[in-house]
Image: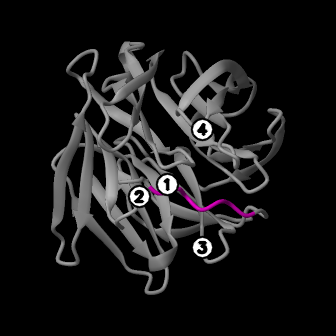
């Protein structure tokens, strides 16, 4: 299960990998640079598009372009082969303070887009982050609040369990919620995993076809798999200290792609790269945002 470097992206904060089967390609973002990036698995070529704000999370839309969580809210992105990126605002977010941005996000199984928010300076330990739900034609809904660094958002195969973490060093917990698939409402919040008991901080996540929860263990160079009852099943290593988020892809959805961080103090030559692992299980197609 040795990790393979597929793109030496040198991302400052690589995040939110999404596999697009029709293109045989992986998309992801580099948050601080505001870049949407793409790797074509057929040609091996990489391409990037520049957005006007920090770009935190993305999901494919039913029209074939992208919905994105950025610094000030939700946007629609349309990349072109010549390097242009059309950016159209969809809905703004009323942050608790001006120095905030959206962070981890994805669609639920019904095509609603979810994203959390955080204060830019994590060292402030400010619990001003919230979790938002966005649907076309509706106002942005604040579902939960009181987070420092919301992360690890994922949904069970039947869509009826939502997972969410707070990756800040003071919190490091993953919660499970009952999820009403008709209204898009999480309830019955409960502790799923206390990551203080394991190596690494909880970062971005994915759920496989067996309903197990995969989460990147930032600062530990690992990706953990937890069973639906919260038991650690296995841990896979990546050759960098700070993996950020994982996603299933490939023609059979049996490859686990992992993005990572390359900070100013990184001494690891592969830090910020995108990696591929053979996890031994298959994933689920990522839902598209319903326009």
Instruction: Please name the residue that numbered disc 3 is placed on.
Output: 250
Residue at 38% across / 26% down in the picture?
141
On whether residue 287 falls in the magenta region, the answer is yes
Main SS type for the magenta part?
Answer: loop
> Mark 1 or mark 2, which is nearer the start of the sequence?
2
Res. 259 mark: 1
- Mark 2: give few (<14), some (14-19) or many (20+) Cα within 10 Å: many
N-terminal label among 3 and 4: 4
Over which residues does the magenta segment extend?
282-288
Q: Is residue 107 above or below residue 122?
A: below
What residue would you read off at disc 2? 28
Query: x, y (%) of residue 107?
Result: 49, 47
**In what quadrant of the picture does the C terminus appear?**
bottom left
Residue 97 lies left or right of residue 286; in this view the side is left
Q: Measuring from the top left, give residue 27's x and y in whole percent.
A: 41, 64
Secondary element under disc 1, as helix, strand or loop, is strand
């Amino acid at each position: 299960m040795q990790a393979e470097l597929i793109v030496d992206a040198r991302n400052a904060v690589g995040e939110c990998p999404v596999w697009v089967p029709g293109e045989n390609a992986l998309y992801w973002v580099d948050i601080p640079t505001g870049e949407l990036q793409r790797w074509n698995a057929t040609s091996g070529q990489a391409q990037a598009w520049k957005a006007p704000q920090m770009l935190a999370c993305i999901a494919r839309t039913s029209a074939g372009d992208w919905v994105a969580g950025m610094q000030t809210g939700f946007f629609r992105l349309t990349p072109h082969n010549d390097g242009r990126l059309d950016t159209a605002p969809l809905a703004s977010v009323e942050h608790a303070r001006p120095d905030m941005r959206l962070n981890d996000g994805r669609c639920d199984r019904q095509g609603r887009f979810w994203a959390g928010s955080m204060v830019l300076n994590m060292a402030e330990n400010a619990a001003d982050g919230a979790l938002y739900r966005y649907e076309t034609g509706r106002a942005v809904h604040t579902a939960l609040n009181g987070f420092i660094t919301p992360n690890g958002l994922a949904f069970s195969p039947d869509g009826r369990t939502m997972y969410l973490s707070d990756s800040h060093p003071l919190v490091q917990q993953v919660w499970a919620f009952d999820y009403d698939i008709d209204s898009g409402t999480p309830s019955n919040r409960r502790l799923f995993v206390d990551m203080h008991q394991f190596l690494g901080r909880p970062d971005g996540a994915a759920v496989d076809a067996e309903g197990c929860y995969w989460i990147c263990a930032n600062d530990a160079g690992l990706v953990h798999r937890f069973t639906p009852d919260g038991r650690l099943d296995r841990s896979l290593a990546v050759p960098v200290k700070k993996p950020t988020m994982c996603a299933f892809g490939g023609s059979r959805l049996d490859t686990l792609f992992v993005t990572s961080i390359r900070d100013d103090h990184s001494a690891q030559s592969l830090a910020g790269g995108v990696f591929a692992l053979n996890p031994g299980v298959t994933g689920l197609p990522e839902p598209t945002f319903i326009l």
